[in-house]
Image: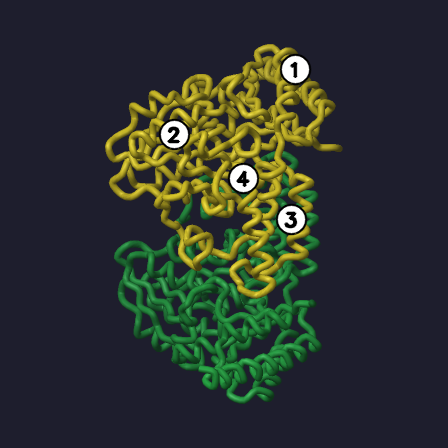
Chain colours: A green, B yellow
Amino acid sequence: MRHFYFDHNATAPLSAAARASLVACLDEVYGNASSIHHFGQAAKQKLEMARRQVAARLGAKPKEIVFVSGGTEADNLALRGIVAPGQHVVTSTIEHPAVLNTCAALGVDVTYVAADSSGLVDPGDVARALRPNTALVSVIHANNELGTVQPIAEIARIARDAGAYFHSDGVQAFGKIPVDVNALGVDLYSISGHKIGAPKGIGALYVREGTPLRAIASGGHHERERRPGTENVPGAVALGIAAETADWTSVAALRDRLESGILARIASASLNGARAERIPNTSNIRFDAIEGEALLISLDLRGFAVSSGAACSSGAVEPSHVLIAIGLTREQARSSIRFSLGPENTEEQVDALIEAVADSVRHLRRISTEVPAHA
Amino acid sequence: MRHFYFDHNATAPLSAAARASLVACLDEVYGNASSIHHFGQAAKQKLEMARRQVAARLGAKPKEIVFVSGGTEADNLALRGIVAPGQHVVTSTIEHPAVLNTCAALGVDVTYVAADSSGLVDPGDVARALRPNTALVSVIHANNELGTVQPIAEIARIARDAGAYFHSDGVQAFGKIPVDVNALGVDLYSISGHKIGAPKGIGALYVREGTPLRAIASGGHHERERRPGTENVPGAVALGIAAETADWTSVAALRDRLESGILARIASASLNGARAERIPNTSNIRFDAIEGEALLISLDLRGFAVSSGAACSSGAVEPSHVLIAIGLTREQARSSIRFSLGPENTEEQVDALIEAVADSVRHLRRISTEVPAHA
């Protein structure tokens, strides 16, 4: 059976361009970028080219890019590397666990600003949450479950006007919508390779020049003392190429085709989160009186991969904290499915998925209607 | 000009077996190992196969393997994840910076046990350094600069008999000499992929069952709550294959050929560290009255990559802390070169390198002799 992938927010396949650059680098450039001989210098050149490519996509300076192992490490570095004991942090209730759980582990006071029912954070709420000792405000750029894009520029201005640093988890936004660190006004911005066609195991943290970031691990002098460990040059090279080439704009039409198809075909299906302010590839839909995980499994058996929550929370019995945070009941949250598309999806796949969702929902509703008769 | 690589302790080229498994995984398995659909389960299967392969090479249980981004992260996790405020740590003066600098950052009392002139730590010194509140003893298995293999089993027994946990940085030992975590008696053991033919960006920490390791980053529930972040499945797969296939035993003959050739041909060349207790691929030689970095550059111009210290310290103006620690003068330390070979080196390359070293040393000595005449 052929399987089709609609779970790009969990991870995306390698893009052809990133794959080519990665394999070439693996085969040709194996030096340690910190070595001073021929092999080391070849690796260093590739690494610095990648840094320029990532910086260019962000509107940043190359030296403001710190390569790390992924989005989770970038978030941890941003938060743990800035906040000190006795300080205060403001974040939102719809952050990724890498931010939420790091905030909880910091050992400082944290204010969690709520998102509204459309999945958007109100900048005014952030302003009201600030305290004289607020060191950092961290608000996710595009939410991983809903795809909603937050008013980052406005929130960043409020935070920085108050003397706090501003961080945004851009893992789901980078490469999918335009990101300019100066237009946004962020001090710190997390990105991940494997969400946009680069391999797993590489990511980066943008750190605005002058931001007093402390390393959170100890070792050699790599990455201007901000992240020790032998540089993952092939990973960085692929991230650089992915940053240069990622183009998800065409995905919006596919996503809209899928979303309107499902909403038109299926009674009691409704959209979670704002329709307008979203990244182009994500649609989160709830199917009343359907168990989301049962729908996921039914679709998987029909060859379609979707998600009933963030992959990093899979296996958890709790419903999505993001859906609860925007006001859904636990039952509604459990009846929701995230569809996240990518550049390699096609209209034919989308149309087949709409049919499969309709069939699965019909089947699952029939089962749930029949059960009482047998009970 | 052809370039030949004799700096494997900095990083090694991908092995053919690891490359094949990596590329196949990159092409075929792109799911998130935490997703519950078809793509996720395929990734999960690959990840757990890799975990079994790494565990098998260590004589460990699969669940005792935590995949991380590399050796530096493994060392940081082992030390920061065990030691708490008010406790005491024992380590050696010849550790890698990932251990030395992490010890310094822990904010606890640390006793640094000296190595002798042959580069070996005396277990009796470790015993004498123990205190009632010693939480952890960390001693490197094979030193990265000298290649000397420490009496880990004896040191581990002393540490554990005293109620302390024992960690060893096995980055340079794993894959090059037999490593059995039970025979060694280690509680924690760090390994790195790119030193033995797997790619950069992947490593692992062995954590003996029951060892109360705390995660040092926050996020999802990956790796049994010990290391958050989307699993680097292709990296882990390649590490698993490298663990299964790495065979560096044949390198010893090449290393000995290189070492005896250099020592026979060049006056005032002498070996740093113990001749016997070494990993098979490393030789650290000092050339009296020669600047090591000048020799490195001269060899690089002749097409041979060697090292004048650990890559992670390159660019540092200080001489090697390891060579100083075993009693060399700063001048002697600066006149030393590390040759580290790998399975793909050949006798022809070794013989050519011996000639190149002899030529370079002759040339550099002539220059240094001539300088006073012009001065």
| Residue under the point 31% across and 33% down | B110
* Residue type indicated by callout 1: Gly
Corner quadrant of residue A210? bottom left
Element assignment for label 2: helix
* Residue type indicated by callout 2: Ala
Element assignment for label 1: helix
B108 relative position to B154: left or right: left
Q: Residue furthest right?
A: B1
Classify B325 as above or below A33. above
Which chain is mark 4 on?
B
Residue B276 locus on image (x, y percent): 53, 17
Residue in the foreground of this view, choosing between A261 and A55: A261
Neighbour tally class for label 3: few under 14, some 14-19, many 20 plus, Cα within 10 Å: many
Mark 2 or mark 3: which comes first in sequence?
A: 3
Residue in the foreground of this view, choosing between A191 and A82: A191
Mark 2 or mark 1: which comes first in sequence?
A: 2
Residue B59 locus on image (x, y percent): 50, 36
Classify B154 as above or below B215. above
